[in-house]
Amino acid sequence: MEITMTMQQEKLAYRVNDFCKAIGLSRSTFYKLLSEGKVKTVSIGGRRLVPVCEAERLLNGGAK
């Protein structure tokens, strides 16, 4: 009998579109916040990603 363990993987980062949908921002508002330095991203392989901790920070009022 084989026992298989499944791990639920949590996201570490969002693509910009997914991030905007997840927290209810338009892309233009996201890029405005980005240009103002109010949101941080990382680029991996030419793709801009938003760490999950940034979503949590913004939702807790961190974009002031």
Image (spheres, rainbow, N blue to C red):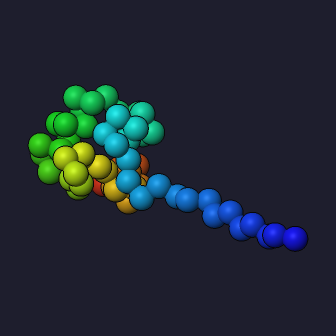
Q: Is residue 4 left or right of residue 20?
A: right
- Image quadrant occupied by the N terminus: bottom right
- The quadrant holding residue 30 is top left
Q: Is residue 26 visible?
A: yes
Residue found 29% across the figure and 49% down from its top = 49
Residue found 38% across the figure and 47% down from its top = 14
Residue found 12% across the figure and 45% down from its top = 36
Q: Is 17 drawn above or below residue 10 in the view shown?
A: above
Query: Foreground residue, 60 or 51?
Result: 51
Query: Foreground residue, 32 or 11?
Result: 11
Residue furthest to the front: 1
Q: At which x and y percent is residue 54?
A: 33, 55
Query: Foreground residue, 16 or 56?
Result: 16
Q: Is residue 8 left or right of residue 45?
A: right
Q: Is residue 2 left or right of residue 31?
A: right
Q: Is residue 40 visible?
A: no
Q: At which x and y percent is residue 33?
A: 20, 42
